[in-house]
Amino acid sequence: MKNIAVIIETDVSKSGREEVKEICFGMITIAREKNCELFAFVINADIQALKPDLKSFGIANILDIVLESDLQYNPVVRAKAMVKAVEKFHIDAVFGLCTPMGKDLLPRMAAQLDAPLVMGCIDVDLQPDSHTKNCLAKTLQYSGKAIATIKTRGNIPIFGVKPNAVKPVKAQTDTRILRFDGIDLDATKLKLIQTGRNDKSADINLSEADIIIAGGRGMKNPENFTTLFKCAKILNASVGASRVAVDEGWVPYSMQVGQTGEKVNPKVYIACGISGSIQHFAGMKTSQMVIAINSDKDAPIMSNSDYYVVADALEVIPELTKLLSSTQPKAANLPNYGVGNKF
């Protein structure tokens, strides 16, 4: 039986309760296979609060990794702690997320373990051949135009899973908690001085968001992006932007979606005043549903959307925000926009 580790990321709910990030459950679903036992690696978290959700998704062991408070956010220390846990519990493969945390942590672990690393996975087969330790990982290539199947060689492969790659599937099991503390970590020359947000572009990271509402040239100025933030707050969404909006200085680069920006995979992508160039489409084409709002009915984004509204986004979004914030929305009060879909 293989021991498989999944690195859990947590967040704090509006009620102040620590919880597992929703995007972790899809990763767990990919990692869960027959003849495999799942270990959830968690650093300095409220394990009892996380246990019910992890138990419902087939996690047999929750490893409570305890680090000194002044070291827990040091990326070098975190990676070393994870590596020591992998070695102590004889882990055969490691799964993490392609989030800012995962992109920083997984390569460090791979370097220390001299292990194969595959990022951006949409599926993984841990047991393609019972006679070897090779694994198969599928990733998107050429801006999503092709799917590559990569065979890993070597011990303890590490996989970075693309958020929202698969639908989470529950699998109830018995779960035990294992404490892993007193870790003897070598001193590092890297010293963490301070942590915090680089900007206030969004409460939810673009790569993790279930819903993204993005603005482009049609937003006309930076002040109009305020309407997107108001709507996003109600939708519990993240706010993105096209390259034009970033180049104009309306919003920071961290909000850019596209070939030269963030590659996103939300359940719903709302494009507001975005024409839909090939470069932008390459960054959001794997969205499960695309809704476009554009005054130009011939804009490329229209033919690449599931639903579209032929109207000025600066008129539609405020009305949509009013409806969403109202306890009894009245659709009859909406202006008569031209609405269509491709089905």
Image (tube, rainbow, N blue to C red):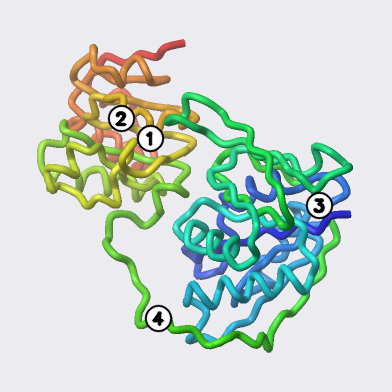
Label 2 Cα neighbours within 10 Å, binned few <14 / some 14-19 / many ≥20: some
Q: Which mark is residue 172?
A: 3
Q: Which mark is residue 283?
A: 1
Disc 1 to disc 2: CB gap under 8 Å: yes
Q: Secondary structure at mark 2?
A: helix
Q: Secondary structure at mark 4?
A: loop
Whether residue 108 is visible to the viewer of this picture, yes or no, is yes
Q: Quadrant of residue 276?
A: top left
Counting residues from the N terminus, which is met first, the one under dot 3 or under dot 1? Answer: 3
Inter-mark Cα distance, 3 to 1: 35 Å
Q: Residue 142: x and y, percent?
A: 44, 30
Q: Amino acid at mark 4?
A: Leu
Q: Amino acid at mark 1?
A: Gly
Question: Which mark is in front, 3 or 1?
Answer: 1
169 lies left or right of 142? right
Residue that mark 2 sits on = 279
* Closer to the camera in the image, 169 or 311: 169
